[in-house]
Amino acid sequence: MAGLARHIDPDELIEKLRDHPSHRTGHHSNRAISHTTPYSSRYASATELSKFRIPHDGAPADVVHQLLKDELDLDGRPNLNLASFVGTYMEKEAEKLMVENLSKNMSDADEYPAMMDMHSRCVSILAHLWGVQKGETAIGTATTGSSEAVHLGGLAMKRRWQERRKAEGKDTSNPNIIMGANAQVALEKFARYFEVEARILPVSVKSRYRLDPELVKENIDENTIGVFVIMGSTYTGHYEPVEEISDILDEYEKKTGIDIPIHVDAASGGFIAPFCGNGGLKWNFELPRVKSINVSGHKFGLVYAGVGWIIFRDEQFLPKHLIFELHYLGGTEESYTLNFSRPGAQIIAQYYNLIHLGFTGYKNIMENALANARLLSRSLEATGWYQCVSDIHRKKGDYAYEKGKKPYEEGQISADYNAGLPVVAFTLSDDFKAKYPHVKQVAVSNLLRAKQYIIPNYALPPNEDKTEILRVVVRESMSIDLLDRLISDICAVTETLMSSDVIDLATWQPTSASIEKQHSSRGVESKNRHRANRPMSDGVHRSVC
């Protein structure tokens, strides 16, 4: 038996239930603002855009776009940010692919199978590029960058160490990991976040500002979960001696039976060394001691910021209980990441670069960057005002600066020179400092900032931190024409400083911090770094990434 029913007027129902608080309160929204251009609206002079609270009413799209664009004009030019390793140029076809796939999420594997196939291909390409051995099944994943990748590599080493110690009935409460004081801060973050003692070994002129193999030998023990070895120091661009450290660990295992693995942090060098060499020395999976390698796709992988990679040489080196099985959107996937949702466009862009450029394309780009870095190095030293701490412009095996020595220019390719990143780390020469003692090196950085270049000035790692360096990262987009202008501007700035007195130099100071920066940051300026809660002498220096 059917129940009685009354007629319902859908128009009346919708009108009653419509969410119109402004109608109920008698308040009339002022959202509809008539204007001809963004600058004819009330936001041009009468009303500020809200900064710290969400506004009651929104503003027209064209007005918000224009005003935010105007504020962002205060940022530096990405291509003139010579402090950063992160790429700022991609071809229009790659950009188009990224825009077309901005909405794709890497966590939705079942929804985007074609994108996930490209992800798998990138992992395979990188594994082969880094010398994975026959019979091994490499495994890896994309990450948001090398910081996450380093943490994943370190965590796998810690868990393998714990499993081995537990099987042997030994204590697992005091793990330690070895790294140089030149390490990027992500490596120390791993140790602090995952409760591992960070044995941060001092670097020196003798060790070429890199992890010292002799100190590694003195600091390893049964509780060492692994050694972080860097292919490309953020300070000076030097490659650390992976093969030499591997030999030390091999000898240690022969004596003690303790197997200590290496994780190679190749954030930058992972996309340079395969194409330009490492001075004939092994650094990758050709060394059995190397269990995992990470790289930043958004550095010399030539993708915009937001992608890194970690590859394990074989599945056995990724502990099974660290892998999560995800049942999501109808499919089942295995995952080993610290993040869940993350953009997929960068993975597509990485695959585009690998296929579009190929081996020879990447090689040409990296050789060009290294050649330009060598030219900048030679030009700086030719002035007599500067000397380089980096040494990629010197003949292979010749590491030290010698005043008046004729520069080596006979090399045809990077293999003829010292291996390293296309980084130029330089300092005022001793002669210049003696003649112009009132000139502070940071003034060079400040004056170049006025010309829109960002070239940092910072101290070398602990133990060598009395020496300050200026550093230029020569990326893909540093053409010979831009390099010529940079050299001219550095010379012009230096001449200005030479003809200035102390009072003049005092006027050249960095811009003051914004209100947001003052309230949101707990850091200190470079000149006050000795006042930091944890000065660099207590750990890894927070260098530019």
Image (spheres, helix red, strand yellow):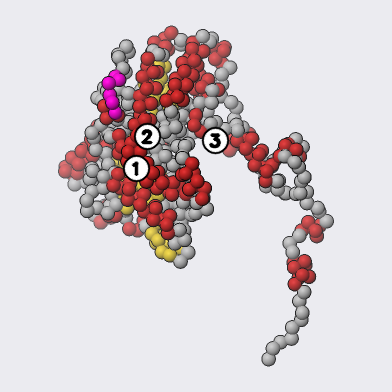
Location of residue 215 (image quadrant): top left
> Is residue 270 shown to the viewer in this render?
no
Q: Determine if the magenta segment contains residue 409.
A: yes
Kind of residue at badge 1: Gly
CA–CA distance between discs 2 and 3? 39 Å
Q: Find out whether the residues at labels 3 and 1 contact each other: C-beta distance under 8 Å.
A: no
> Is disc 2 placed on a helix, strand or loop?
helix
Q: Position of residue 386 (x, y in %)?
A: 40, 16
Q: Position of residue 395 (x, y in %)?
A: 27, 23
Q: Residue at x 38, y 44 (%)?
A: 356
The residue to which callout 2 is attached is 365
CA–CA distance between discs 3 and 1? 44 Å
Q: Earlier in the sequence, mark 1 or mark 2?
A: 1
Q: Earlier in the sequence, mark 2 or mark 3?
A: 2
Residue 216 drawn above or below residue 377: below
- Crowding at dot 3, Cα within 10 Å, few <14 / some 14-19 / many 20+, comes out as few
CA–CA distance between discs 1 and 2? 11 Å
